Image (tube, rainbow, N blue to C red):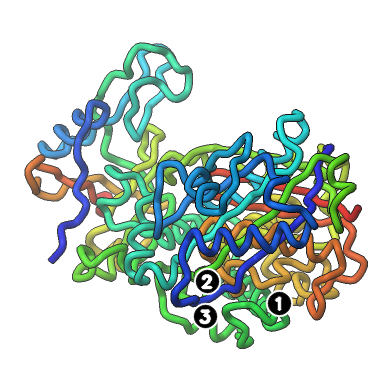
Amino acid sequence: MRAAITGIGETAVGELPGSSCMGLHSEAALRALRDAGLSPGELDGVLCAYSFTEPHLMLASVFCESFGIQPAWSAALQCGGATGCAAVMQAAALVEAGLCRHVLVVMGDNRLSGLSRDRAVAALAEVGHPQFERPLGVTVPALYALVAQAYMHEYGVREEHLAAMAVACRTHAARHPGAQMRAPITVEEVLRSRVIAAPLKLLDCCLISDGGAAVIVSAADAARDTRRPVRLLGAGQKTTHEHLIAAPSLTAFGCQAAAEQAFGQAGVRPADIDVAEIYDSFTITLLLELEAIGFFEKGEAGPAALAGALDLGGRLPCNTHGGLLSYAHPGAAGGLFHVVEAVRQLRGEAEARQVKDAALAYVHGDGGILSAHAALVLGRA
Amino acid sequence: MAQTPLPRPNAETRPFWEGAARGVLRIQRCTACGAAQFPPRALCGRCHAPAPPRWEEASGRGVIASHTTVHRPPSAAFREEVPYTLALVTLQEGPRLLVRLRGDLARAPRIGAPVVIRFDPPAGPDAIALPHAEAAP
């Protein structure tokens, strides 16, 4: 692909009293511009996502007005947790088509301080089918729990295998000074945490956070003017359904097709990847995707993670910032943090959590109930 | 107690809820390719035949495809009901339905267990009868 990620930026994460949706967008955008060595006026494309605290029909225009730019092209994109990766893919298409030179992808929300936890849970539950799921009392954890139960049944996955995903993310987060949750946890602590929707327990579920992230995608020739570009080698997407009742399968989703497209375009295989940043809204999300994408055989990701495969020095260091489970999850920006971390790893700027000689990174986002998938393969310049 | 989010029937779903209020499970079937379909839509989601799928009475029998017991409710409206068990049921006709599990099966749900679909008493201004499942007799 003829596109590069030329700037990354993020705000602090966690509970940020006094923060606002647009304030977080602007702070992340400024940091990404500074990182790239670009000025706001050089942006000719803007892609935003969505907000729970300041919802708007045209969030990209709201952001551009607030930030003080008048780009040639802007739009908001909504595909849940896949939005971060999908927006990078869309931005790359814009620069490859010659429509833009520098596209800002920016997302943020004060989901924790701007909403009560109850309101956030209720707002998320609205992804359930309004007539055939929500009236029964579903939550997003319950819908993922239904996937977890089916997947465990089919492939012999046990609850400690799910717990191993949470432990792996927390182990990484402990090395990230900015992560929301840094205290180490054990498999036993995950298993003993309060049941949310069986078999998922509190520590199987992602965080609710405030925070923002931004990425600048530039045309390959324009990238030369920036500081430390990282190459976008491949991208892929796949959508199979929205509501779980209409999913073609409860154990096989669009992850594989999106990943195959991205790997094919990049001309690499899963075994070539040095570091992976994979959507982890729940432990089952991460485990299932690790296996569907081809990093592990079916039923093997859990035992491998228990043996340290996802840690630094393991077979596939994964979610090195701590992921949605331990770094932060402020909504669409949550998926974009995975991209930011992959770029940081490829630049060798990940400090205590650096994967040695990381040259190839894989990033995966999924939205809905494993409904929409977006995959990226990034490479060191 | 806050109101639970009862369905608001629309052009696509009204026949389902009218059947439900009479204790009858109805699904759609394409008149062109014969595919059974749920949730209901204006066209066939498999062959895209423009003719609207026909409604038919389903067997009301299926097996549990997956289940979860919910301890953390989506809203205050469901707080007094937790814990409750939800199941995805694969109907004999093929489509999948989400229901509450009732009876002994709710305490010990099992993937593959045969169930029958029943309906709660109709409630609310639209006389909505929500589906539930029990162990097949």
The chain to which mark 3 is attached is: A
- Relative to A182, is A332 above or below? above
Precedes in sequence: disc 3 or disc 2 = 3
Q: Gap in Å between the C-alphas at discs 1 and 3? A: 19 Å
The chain to which mark 2 is attached is: A
Residue A206 or A249: which is nearer the viewer? A206
Residue A165 or A17: which is nearer the viewer? A17
Give the residue number, with chain letter if any, for mark 2: A204
Give the residue number, with chain letter if any, for mark 3: A191
Q: Gap in Å between the C-alphas at discs 3 and 2? A: 9 Å
Secondary structure category for the residue under label 2:
helix
Q: Is residue A252 visible?
A: no
Instruction: Name the amino acid, label 3.
Output: Leu
Question: Taking A347 as reference, is A367 left or right?
Answer: left
Q: Residue at 51% of width from left, 53% of height from top?
A: A66
Instruction: Name the amino acid, label 1.
Output: His
Question: Taking A142 as reference, is A100 left or right?
Answer: right
Instruction: Name the amino acid, label 2.
Output: Asp
**Disc 3: CA contacts within 10 A as few (<14), some (14-19) or many (>=20):** many
Secondary structure category for the residue under label 1:
helix
Q: Gap in Å between the C-alphas at discs 2 and 1? A: 16 Å
Instruction: Name the mark nearer the viewer: 1 or 3.
Output: 1
Q: Which mark is residue A172?
A: 1
Identify the image quadrant of the N terminus of chain A: top right
- Relative to A265, is A351 above or below? below
Q: Residue at 87% of width from left, 46% of height from top?
A: A268
Q: Residue A3, percent across and down?
A: 81, 41
Q: Residue A307, percent across and down?
A: 75, 77
Q: Residue A82, percent across and down?
A: 58, 49
Q: Which mark is residue A94?
A: none
